[in-house]
């Protein structure tokens, strides 16, 4: 899937807004900046790397040689990067800040509301634009993995300084630092399967490749999907 890089998923959602209502959402965004406490539910979702809402007016579309665009609506562009599957993210978003989502998409055409979740998911799916190319510098690590690695790095740097103080001081520092970061030393694990259909298709494709081109086509091993 072009939207997936390791543990990360890139989402882009473009929804139309009647120009006469665009000012409402711009005012709501200013209000959200002035009252950041309203976003505590969003900031507490550790699966999110980044999330941004952008208002694009109908006269702001770039001309890349295709000529001026004739657009009747303004648009809301939502971009996000997160860990986990599409369903997990939408569920967490709707549970974390349902009222915030309703404000951010308040002016979008036919927005059904974040609750109940089924119409909201259908709305996002209908307006989502798949990512043509998605680069992630740390595809095997989630946000928590990166934070854990940074804590371990800081602990190692402190140990390097403690080493110069002698064996006794280093031994004390070792015990102290190990206790502080012991929960950060585990493996980051595997990325969740984005789609069981995709997982099964990969397994079937591997089997076909082995039959046609031999075991070396897949490194001598053929993955098997769960039944």
Image (spheres, rainbow, N blue to C red):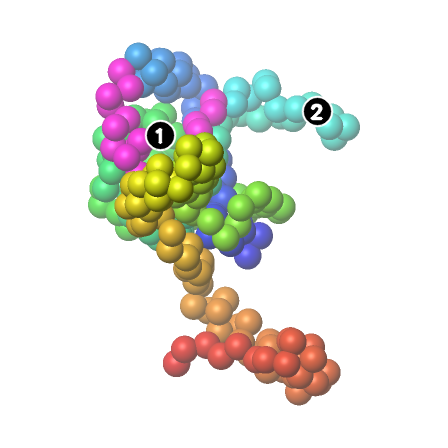
Q: Is residue 108 above or below residue 174?
A: above
Q: Are marks 1 and 2 in contact (CB under 8 Å)?
A: no
Which residue is identified by label 2? Answer: 63
What separation in Å lies between label 1 and label 2 (alpha carbons)?
27 Å
Q: Residue at x 66, y 87 (%)?
A: 211
The mark nearer the N terminus, 1 or 2, is 2
Q: Residue at x 36, y 18 (%)?
A: 29
Q: Position of residue 186 (x, y in %)?
A: 37, 55
Which residue is identified by label 1? Answer: 105
The segment highlighted magenta reads: 35-55
Q: Residue at x 34, y 16 (%)?
A: 33
Along the viewing direction, whichever of 80 and 46 lies nearer the viewer: 46
Q: Residue at x 23, y 42 (%)?
A: 95
Q: Residue 222 vs residue 48: left or right? A: right
Q: Which label was assigned to residue 190?
A: none
Q: Position of residue 157 (x, y in %)?
A: 46, 35
């Amino acid at each position: 899937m072009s939207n997936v890089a390791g543990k990360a998923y890139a989402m882009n959602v473009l929804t139309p807004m009647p120009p006469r209502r665009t000012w409402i959402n711009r005012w709501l965004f200013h209000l959200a900046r002035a009252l950041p406490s309203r976003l505590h539910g969003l900031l507490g979702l550790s699966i999110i790397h980044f999330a941004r809402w952008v208002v694009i007016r109908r006269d702001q579309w770039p001309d890349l040689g295709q000529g001026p665009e004739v657009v009747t609506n303004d648009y809301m562009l939502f971009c996000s990067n997160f860990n986990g599957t599409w369903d997990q993210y939408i569920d967490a978003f709707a549970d974390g800040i349902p009222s915030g989502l309703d404000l951010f998409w308040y002016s979008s055409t036919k927005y059904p509301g974040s609750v109940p979740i089924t119409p909201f998911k259908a709305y996002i799916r209908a307006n989502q634009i798949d990512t043509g190319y998605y680069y992630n510098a740390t595809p095997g690590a989630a946000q928590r993995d990166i934070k854990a690695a940074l804590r371990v790095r800081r602990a190692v740097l402190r140990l390097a300084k403690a080493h110069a103080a002698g064996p006794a001081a280093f031994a004390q520092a070792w015990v102290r630092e190990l206790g502080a970061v012991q929960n950060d030393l585990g493996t980051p694990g595997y990325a969740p399967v984005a789609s069981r259909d995709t997982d099964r298709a990969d397994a079937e494709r591997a089997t076909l490749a082995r039959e046609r081109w031999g075991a070396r086509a897949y490194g001598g091993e053929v993955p098997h999907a769960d039944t």
